[in-house]
Amino acid sequence: MNHRYLPMTTEDQKEMLQAIGVDSIEDLFSDIPSDVRFKGNYDIKPAKSESALLKELTDLAAKNADLRSYSSFLGAGVYDHYMPVIVDHVISRSEFYTAYTPYQPEISQGELQAIFEFQTMICELTGMDVANSSMYDGGTALAEAAMLAAGSTRRKKLLVSEAVHPESRAVLATYAKGQYIDLEVVPCKDGVTDLEKLAELMDGDTAGFIVQYPNFFGRIENLAEVEKLVHGQKAMMIVSSNPLSLGILTPPGKFGADIVIGDAQPFGIPAAFGGPHCGYFAVTSKLMRKVPGRLVGQTVDEEGKRGFVLTLQAREQHIRRDKATSNICSNQALNALAASVAMTALGKQGVKEMAAQNIQKAYYAKEALKANGLEIAFEGPSFNEFVLKLNGSVADANRMLLDKGIIGGYDLGKDYPELKGHMLVAVTEQRLREEIDTFAKELGDFHA
């Protein structure tokens, strides 16, 4: 055996080549003309021993600014939250870690129940009637929600708030182009959706309006007023929401939302360089037959015992592909399980307390920054993020902070030219008072 992770001997190789009737690996490429084959040496380093290779990779990994070694104030959709130790223990069990599509319910009851519990918890958080087994991430969940609204209302115009995550709006624009849907952005005013402009743009051709709660700037949108404007035109109200915030904020379902989507990353899912994560998708009962992806339902077997099955399956992934409202036919079951385990470990009171700490610590950070001579761009209710106005370059400030062992906030000038010199700061329950004070002092000194 020549390789630690490829248990194939030289004899195995010979037997396989013999079975397919060739003498060497080179013979497998005989159909490719000799003059177009690459005959040089690849520009890669020479092979190293296992010990030398592990040392090199360890040294490279040590250069990462990881969340264990650095204090992070970076959010913008991916957050540093407390992860109960039990999460990794449960999702590492082989029956979950290696599970595949549960099409055979008689041998997949554990996986199906885990998904069912995830759906139930999402419904409790969002105040909605039905949730699916998960989506790829928050961005694709948002775009799928928009397409559902357009298909259900048979209208070809969608409105989206400028305060929705820019990356999610980019995904939405791609979807809309393919479906020949007109997409209009409703501008912001003081860090929240301009409701007067929304009222002007809403009309009888509008399929739905997408708003984020809390929004990309951390502000809390007025969903009660949004609902009046949207439903007044018989359009759909789509809310993208951080699920952790719903531990303390009034859930969108209570405001009459038709679809609530988001990313479950705050619950038990590591930042992991931006993914993979886990989107969630919840709707009112009248829309449950149009939900993309999978739904797990609870039933009883012939002996009356509780059981779980995939339900409402006459949809896009099976027999009605020509009438499909979506081509999503999978889910993020392992990450959904991680979120479920985290929520279960925290419990209702724990989720509420964790959400409250995000609000309180973000408020403390605002006050500390202002005490150090810095300006908060948009004052008003917020969750765990807010916009900080700097006297200079955000990139320069972040380089300085990194040298001090701090991961700074997101440079809003990348997506909002009018907010050049503004930093989106995230403060979660993970940040200690000392870390916040140091962050505020270093920024204050840098831009004094």
Image (cartoon, grey):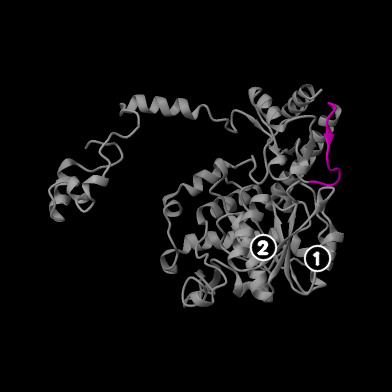
Point out the residue furthest to the front here. Answer: 35
Q: Which range is magenta?
A: 372-382
Choose between 216 and 296: the one closer to the eye. Answer: 216
Q: Distance between the residues labelled 2 and 1?
A: 31 Å
Look at the image and tell me whether residue 111 can be seen.
yes
Q: Identify whether 123 is placed above or below 65.
A: below
The location of residue 139, given as percent across then percent down, is 62, 55
Main SS category, magenta section: loop
Check disc 1 and give the amino acid type. Answer: Leu
Element at badge 1? helix
Q: Which residue is drawn at 54% across and 66% down?
A: 293
Badge 2 crowding class, 10 Å Cα cut-off, few under 14, some 14 to 19, many 20 or more, is many
The location of residue 312, given as percent across then percent down, is 54, 75
Q: Mark 2 points at which residue?
A: 123
Q: Which residue is drawn at 55% across and 70% down?
A: 297
Element at badge 2? helix
Q: Which of marks 2 and 1 is nearer the N terminus?
A: 2
The location of residue 128, given as percent across then percent down, is 70, 65
Number of disc labels: 2
Q: Nearer the viewer, mark 2 or mark 1?
A: 1
Badge 1 crowding class, 10 Å Cα cut-off, few under 14, some 14 to 19, many 20 or more, is some
Q: Identify whether 26 is placed above or below 256.
A: above
- Horizontally, is 221 left or right of 413 in the view? right
- Horizontally, is 219 left or right of 324 in the view? right
- Horizontally, is 110 left or right of 186 in the view? left
Choose between 102 and 370: the one closer to the eye. Answer: 370
- Horizontally, is 157 left or right of 104 in the view? right
Where residue 201 is drawn, which disc sits there?
1
Check disc 2 and give the amino acid type. Answer: Cys
Specify the quadrant of the image occupied by residue 230: bottom right
> Is residue 259 covered in magenta?
no
Locate the N terminus and report the quarter of the image it occupies.
top left
